[in-house]
Image (tube, rainbow, N blue to C red):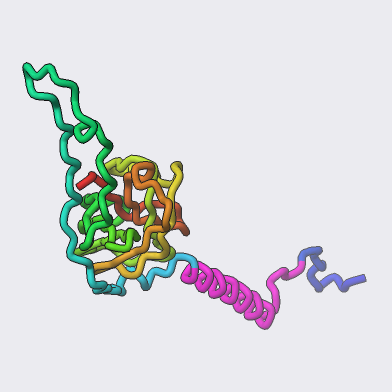
Amino acid sequence: MPDAGEPAATGTTDATPPPHRRHVWWWVIGGVLAVGAVIAALVFQPWLLFIDVRVDDEIPVASAAPTAAPAREPTAGSSSPPSARDTAMPAPSPPPAAPVELSHGTLISHEHETSGTVRVIQLPDGSRQLAIEDLETTNGPDVHVWLSAGPVVEGFDGWFTAGGHPYVDLGMIKGNQGDQLYDIPTGVDLAAYPTVDLWCVQFAVSFGAAAMTPS
């Protein structure tokens, strides 16, 4: 029993952790934040925004594809039937002796400022290449060159259009500047894929796109 002159004891205790425990918690929190920062950096790779990669592939000199000759029509007033020579099917055209431009287009900007011209070129051996010339865009993670079945839509709505349509992946983009060539697989129907899209696979967004027009 306490003496009359001593204060009565209370039921409260000091809940403040000892200094060494506070230091441990700060180390734990700091470690978690550091790991999170490293993971975010690996995912977003922000340093790529400040690095330009220029490519200077040698683009073949190509002329526009020749147009088919119009069918021969009978002369007005002629009553004689056409000869076998006139009705014979034309012989198939031989492969071109020089590169031929099959289609062309101009890149527009989507999520990032993008410019440049795009052409599909057929080589004398029948193979085809996609040529991107004077390319200027932002460097980014996991950007691929697509032939897309989707249309080119300007503005924000066009950022995600290609992701909802069939596509042919020509591979990761070689760089964000310069002149570049990409092989088009044999058997690809270019009429079914009238768009070229620079597509960021990691974030499912378009950097830029071009609608292709037959040459």
What residue is shown at x 22% (from left), y 67% (from top)? 59
Snapshot quadrant of residue 89 = top left
In this rendered view, identify the residue nearer to me: 135 or 214. Answer: 214
Image: 63 above or below 213: below
For this orientation, the residue located farthest to the bottom is 20
What residue is shown at x 20% (from left), y 50% (from top)? 65
Q: Is residue 5 left or right of residue 198?
A: right
- Magenta highlight range: 13-42
Image: 97 above or below 194: below
**Residue 90 shows in the view:** yes
Image: 85 above or below 100: above
Q: Is residue 96 left or right of residue 197?
A: left
**Residue 113 shows in the view:** no
Residue 131, given in percent of the width and then of the height, sits at 27, 61
What residue is shown at x 34% (from left), y 60% (from top)? 127
Magenta segment main secondary structure:
helix
Residue 17, given in percent of the width and then of the height, sits at 70, 74
In this rendered view, identify the residue nearer to me: 44 or 200. Answer: 200
Residue 165, given in percent of the width and then of the height, sits at 44, 42
Numbered label tally: 0
Residue 9, given in percent of the width and then of the height, sits at 82, 68
**Can you say which quadrant of the picture contains the N terminus?**
bottom right
Image: 100 above or below 163: below
Taking the magenta stretch, the answer to whether it contains residue 63 is: no
In this rendered view, identify the residue nearer to me: 187 or 85. Answer: 85
Q: Is residue 151 left or right of residue 44?
A: left
Taking the magenta stretch, the answer to whether it contains residue 41 is: yes
